[in-house]
């Protein structure tokens, strides 16, 4: 027959696999049927090779591959000639092969297909994650397993990216919740500190310089300042702390902190500074840089229980696009690099990945809060900078802090605070915290002012209407009943242009939400020092 010349060389094998005629000799009467089935097979082969999924036909129970499509060749790296005759179990991991055999045995009884995720082992040894759907079929009296394998690399990558985004979202939500908590703590704590530092300052002002008790008052005020710094740390860590940025010489800040750092570490820790010859200026709040130095020095001290060297180095650097290639973030430009190194125990990779997480600590229970490095991270990010860490077990740790360089020179030191001045004006103080209200009354009345007190916003309006002439309102921004802005609006309608000074222990962003527009009104944050309060009151009255 004419078409017989088109028969392939492996005609007998093809006949045995597809038509199922066994090893019996071919009779002429079979030719039309063989040709029809051959054409069907060719059409079937085209359909199989068009599939993007890998398809194999394996003999049962041997697992020998009787046929494959083009996609499984692309997936595995084997040619069709190499695959046919191989065992399917050579393409999967040993533990998965036994699992597949067990599932197929159960499927032979239940007559239902199986669906499983496995790893396809390529010719070069690489593993490709695939989703395999398999079913037993009977062809010409022989049983085969037909398996369809779909590459799920992209799906797994998408799932991992989704999990990463979900983790970032949860972290962001956690940070937001902690930030709100920090704001509440700041308000209550700053009210307490206002009274503590205020009365301490009044006592200090009234004592002679040679009074032997003055040193105790100084210690009280010093401890109060540390408590205030702790509140600032919480807010910096949550990135809600309002800061006043100015151009500062980073070398000068470090030199100013050196004495305190020496007290912070143990005597067997040597502090070494290597400062850039030029004055590297950055836009910062100097107290925040102090906080960064104290936190990192405290960590270094704990990492060197037997002593060592703490090195603080500054230099001016220019970052190019390489920082984005290496670290995956960064903006090219001029930076001031502050490196803090220790010769301590160092960290392994899992520890390095978690060190900036809130409340994560490697210290023993009761010896660490887990807020130190997260505070440092929050401060650096507030400065639009970057922080990296190099560390290995037993080889010490180095933190690299990149701060955007400031244009021009560092700001000159502010002149000493002017002596407090009093007056004889009438002032209405609206403050819901009794201790703070009492302190303000005490300070202002001692300097000649007439004081009217109110316990909340509603009471403030009543006291104003009852008192007659009031020259200045001192209003807590957040109070029960009516907040400070609502009180001001109502009184301003009665007496247009009345002077006002807002105060609060909350962060500035919360105050802004209460309608105290930044720079449109005078504002002083708690804890407030008596001299600062007196000077601010005088400034507002004389404006």
Image (cartoon, helix red, strand yellow):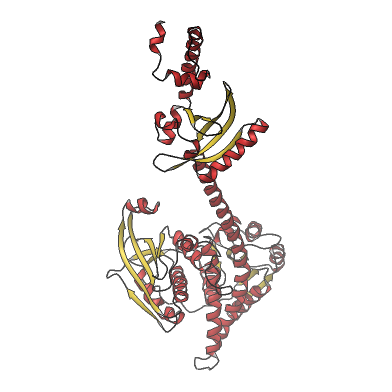
Q: Quadrant of residue 480?
A: bottom right
Q: Residue 247, located in which quarter of the rendered image?
A: bottom left
Give the vertical position of 390 relative to 193 (above or below): above
The vertical placement of 302 against 321, above or below, is below
Where is residue 138 shown, x and y percent of the image?
Answer: 59, 24
Which is more toward the observer, 159 or 116?
Answer: 116
Q: Which residue is pictured at 57% across the width and 20% down the height?
A: 140
Tell whether 71 sits left or right of 516: left
108 or 452: which is nearer to us? 108
Q: Position of residue 155 (x, y in %)?
A: 51, 39
Q: Which residue is at the far left?
A: 277
Quadrant of the snapshot with the N terminus: top left
Instruction: Locate residue 192, reporting x and y percent.
Output: 62, 74
Position above or below: 473 against 51:
below
Report whether residue 53 is seen.
Answer: no
Q: Residue at x 53, y 94 (%)?
A: 212
Asked if one can make out residue 250 in the rendered structure from this viewpoint, the answer is yes
Relative image position of residue 299 (x, y in whole percent): 47, 72
Looking at the picture, tell me which residue is in the foreground, 79 or 3: 3
Numbered-mark total: 0
- Between 342 and 29, the one lying in front of the other is 29
């Amino acid at each position: 027959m004419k078409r017989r010349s088109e028969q392939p060389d492996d005609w007998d094998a093809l006949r045995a696999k597809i038509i199922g005629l066994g090893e019996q000799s071919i009779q002429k009467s079979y030719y039309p049927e063989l040709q029809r089935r051959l054409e069907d097979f060719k059409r079937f082969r085209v359909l199989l090779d068009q599939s993007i999924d890998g398809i194999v036909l394996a003999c049962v129970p041997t697992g020998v591959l009787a046929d494959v499509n083009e996609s499984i060749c692309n997936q595995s790296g084997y040619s069709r000639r190499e695959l046919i005759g191989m065992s399917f179990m050579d393409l999967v991991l040993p533990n998965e092969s036994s699992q597949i055999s067990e599932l197929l045995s159960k499927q032979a009884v239940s007559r239902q297909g199986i669906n499983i995720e496995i790893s396809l082992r390529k010719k070069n040894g690489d593993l490709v994650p695939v989703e395999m759907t398999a079913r037993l079929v009977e062809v010409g009296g022989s049983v085969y397993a037909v398996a369809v394998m779909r590459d799920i690399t992209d799906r797994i990558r998408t799932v991992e990216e989704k999990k990463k985004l979900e983790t970032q979202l949860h972290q962001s939500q956690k940070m937001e919740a902690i930030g709100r908590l920090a704001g509440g703590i700041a308000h209550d704590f700053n009210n307490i500190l206002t009274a503590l530092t205020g009365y301490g300052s009044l006592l200090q002002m009234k004592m002679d310089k040679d009074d032997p008790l003055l040193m105790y008052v100084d210690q009280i005020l010093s401890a109060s300042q540390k408590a205030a710094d702790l509140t600032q740390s919480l807010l910096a860590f949550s990135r809600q702390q309002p800061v006043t940025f100015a151009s500062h010489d980073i070398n000068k800040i470090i030199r100013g902190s050196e004495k305190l750092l020496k007290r912070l570490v143990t005597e067997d820790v040597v502090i070494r500074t290597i400062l850039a010859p030029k004055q590297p200026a950055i836009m910062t709040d100097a107290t925040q840089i102090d906080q960064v130095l104290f936190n990192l020095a405290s960590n270094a001290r704990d990492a060197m229980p037997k002593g060592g060297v703490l090195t603080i180095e500054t230099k001016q650097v220019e970052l190019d696009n390489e920082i984005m290639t290496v670290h995956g973030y960064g903006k090219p430009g001029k930076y001031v690099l502050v490196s803090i190194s220790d010769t301590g125990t160092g960290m392994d990779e899992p520890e390095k990945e978690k060190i900036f997480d809130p409340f994560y600590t490697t210290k023993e229970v009761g010896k660490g809060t887990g807020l130190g490095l997260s505070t440092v991270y929050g401060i650096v990010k507030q400065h639009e900078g970057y922080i990296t860490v190099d560390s290995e077990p037993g080889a010490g740790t180095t933190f690299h802090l990149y701060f955007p360089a400031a244009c021009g020179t560092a700001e000159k030191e502010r002149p000493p605070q002017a002596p407090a001045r009093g007056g004889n004006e009438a002032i209405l103080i609206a403050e819901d915290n009794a201790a703070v209200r009492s302190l303000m009354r005490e300070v202002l009345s001692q300097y000649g002012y007439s004081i009217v007190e109110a316990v909340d916003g509603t009471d403030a309006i009543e006291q104003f209407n009852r008192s007659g002439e009031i020259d200045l309102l001192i209003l807590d921004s957040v109070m029960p009943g009516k907040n400070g802005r609502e009180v001001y609006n109502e009184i301003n309608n009665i007496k247009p242009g009345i002077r006002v000074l807002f105060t609060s222990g909350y962060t500035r962003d919360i105050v802004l939400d209460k309608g105290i527009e930044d720079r449109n009104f005078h504002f002083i944050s708690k804890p407030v020092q008596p001299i600062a309060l007196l000077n601010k009151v005088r400034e507002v009255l004389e404006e």
